[in-house]
Image (cartoon, helix red, strand yellow):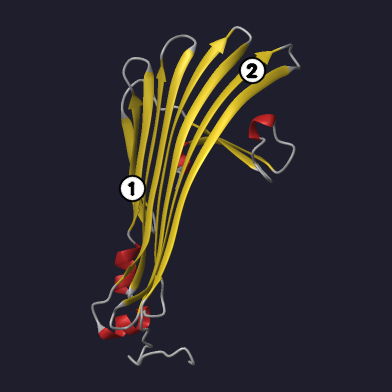
Amino acid sequence: FLNLDLVEGITFSAGGFGARYGDKMSSSLAIDLLEGRADRVGGKLLVSATQFGASAEGPLGSSGSFQLSARKSYLDLVFKAAGLGFVPVYTDFNLAARLQLGERDQLFFLGLSALDHIDLDQGTQKNRVRNASLPDIGLNVGIAGLRYRHLYDRGQLEAVASLSLYDFAFRQSDARPVEYFRSDALERELTLKLDRSWLISERWVLSAGLGHRRMFQRDGARFADTIYDRSGRPVTPEE
């Protein structure tokens, strides 16, 4: 759900990555974002085969810049025109902002959000029977991060705080339609990092850092007392 128009470069390491990625198990992915234009506000509109959206960028005060992006699918119009009773719907938002506090200090903020779900059209009996075999899935994701960087003559200090939210829902209904199964999962993760690096020579850099991670997770599942098949008959355990 990251708009590729905001990406400057990607570095992928399948192994042998630096110590700053030591908490990763198998690989690391570093994404560098473009800086927003500092002269004036600009933007563009996007229309593709599956989505539409808009993006904007421009100066933030006298020493910063921002980038903003919003996209939404319009597959619901295509699926409904085809007579289908289920529609995947997704929306995402991106916000990146940089603020130069001085010659050696900089703040950077990144916010990402994605709202995805399956929209089931239960307006007709035919759709209700057909949708009885389809799951109603929803996934909401939110990520926010703030980075402070200070440059020294031969090194830098970097402090990062980030918060990630994941909300997943899975529902199943019969042809009446009555919900007979529901599963919800909520995850939150707070990460704090502090890195300090020293340039020893042209070939050697010494880095040290501290990190703290706090996670919260809540899961739940519910079943109805009685489950019905597509014909409206109760399903017994023997079946």
- Percent across and percent down for residue 220 are 42, 62
In the displayed structure, 122 sits above or below 11; it is: below
Is 166 positioned to the left or the right of 125 in the image? Answer: right
The residue at 66%/14% (across/down) is 198
Specify the amino acid type for callout 2.
Ser
The part of the image, by quadrant, that contains residue 23 is top right
Q: Is residue 54 visible?
A: yes
Among numbered discs 1 and 2, the one appearing first in the sequence: 1
Quarter assignment of residue 19: top right
- The percent position of residue 184, horizontal first and vertical second, equals 41, 61
SS class, disc 2: strand
Going by the image, does 17 lie left or right of 85?
A: right
Q: Nearer the viewer, residue 170 or 203?
A: 170
Q: What percent of the width, then of the height, locates residue 237? A: 47, 88
Residue at the extreme left of the image, as rendered? 123
Tag 2 residue: 197
Label 1 and label 2: CA atoms lie apart by: 40 Å
Relative depth, front residue between 235 and 202:
235
Question: Percent from the top left, x then y, of residue 239?
Answer: 48, 92
Residue 128 placement: quadrant: bottom left
77 shown above or below 134? above
Q: Nearer the viewer, residue 177 or 104?
A: 177
Q: Residues within 10 Å of mark 1 (few under 14, many from 20)?
A: some
Q: Is residue 201 left or right of residue 144?
A: right
User: Which residue is found at the position 38% from the left and 24% from the top?
Assistant: 65
From the image, tell me which residue sits under label 1: 53
Q: Return the mark for residue 88.
A: none
Q: Is residue 83 visible?
A: no
